Amino acid sequence: MKKVLITGAAGFLGSHLCDRFIAEGFYVIGMDNFITGDKKNISHLENNANFEFIKHDVTEFISIEGDLDYVLHFASPASPIDYLKIPIQTLKVGSLGTHNLLGLAKAKNARLLIASTSEVYGDPLVHPQTESYYGNVNTIGPRGVYDEAKRFQESITMAYHRFHGVETRIVRIFNTYGPRMRLNDGRVIPAFMGQALRGEDLTVFGDGMQTRSFCYVDDQVEGIFRLMFSDYANPVNIGNPNEITIKDFAEEIIKLTNTSQKIIYKELPVDDPLQRQPDITLAKKLLGWQPKVEREEGMLKTFNYFKSLSDEDLYKSEHKDFSKHIKK
């Protein structure tokens, strides 16, 4: 049985990847320190014979006993509320954490896939974004702690691939949604759905003409799985190219939730990208992959998940105190 280590295992995407690799017959070691992950996301795996969990901060030295075949590095804060609250930890997990995992992969002769992001493109001047675009990132802006952590992560991964011959894969993840997202993580889908469920008006930043492209989690996991077992080491965009303005999306959510809330407008945050749409030509050609789940279907599944949450989750503050987790 092949063994895979998945960091960020209690997070949104990490937990779905644990499920997928177990379903494919792998022995999965999940790792998380619960800064932004949730034990509930992996509670259903507690008694699974092909799953074990290690509570650990990947910025510290990592030791895994025995053989290890694959590593997926998904440990990182991934929403603005998180990485603006814990900027140093965000930078460390992308740099020190990636360095530790590359060292582990080298020692174990394992293949490593890192979770990069569309944020490496910053506020793009090229539309849609292809993998060859270098990006337009403000290195010293408030979002730079996440953007630059991911850009460095890509650089050190390619350095280990070229200099040490480590087998590496890089996925650039565009906006992904589905069950197990945190309602309070500040991203647009849980924000809108949470506001609708609480009977609040939907908050749109700027004039609402900025665009996003949303990929359902099952499609994202399928793309990541195929990339892991491909022979391609350079970055690959995985996302849904179906673009929509935030204003139109807010109206879709009001219709989906059958609520009567209004849309209210607030000032656009610093460096918030005005356009976000993946060019997935490479993924189609290389992996035979493209998204299958229509937004209407995926949003309904996601909304039903959020409706099933407790009132405590529904009304939980967006500004969770992470201070006890931070190493100075």
Image: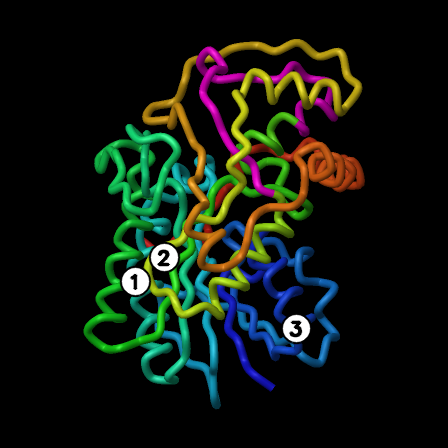
The answer to if 105 sits in the magenta stretch is: no
Left or right, 258 with reference to 10: right
Above or below, comparing residue 10 to residue 52 in the picture: above
For label 3, the residue is 24
Label 2 element class:
helix
What amino acid does circle 3 point to? Glu
Q: Residue at x 55, y 43 (%)?
A: 176
Dot placed on the residue nearer the N-terminal end, 1 or 3: 3
Percent of width and height locating residue 234: 33, 59
Would you say residue 312 is visible in this rendering?
no
**For the view shown, which residue lies furthest in the left direction?**
163
Give the image quarter of residue 177: top right
Residue type beneath disc 1: Leu
Q: Against 47, is 78 above or below?
A: above
Residue 312, position as x, y percentages in the image: 72, 38
Label disc, if present, on residue 96 of the rendered structure:
1
Q: Circle 3 — which element? A: loop
Q: Are marks 1 and 2 in contact (CB under 8 Å)?
A: yes
Q: Residue at x 68, y 31 (%)?
A: 315
Distance from disc 1 to disc 3, alpha carbons, whole Å, reads: 30 Å
In the rendering, at what x and y percent does residue 44 appear? 74, 64
Residue 304 shows up from this direction? yes
**Mark 2 surroundings within 10 Å by alpha-carbon count, few (fewer than 14), some (14 through 19), many (20 or more):** many
**Front residue of this view, candidates 43 and 211:** 211
Q: Position of residue 61 (x, y in %)?
A: 35, 74
Q: Which residues are magenta?
A: 193-215
Q: Amino acid at mark 2?
A: Val
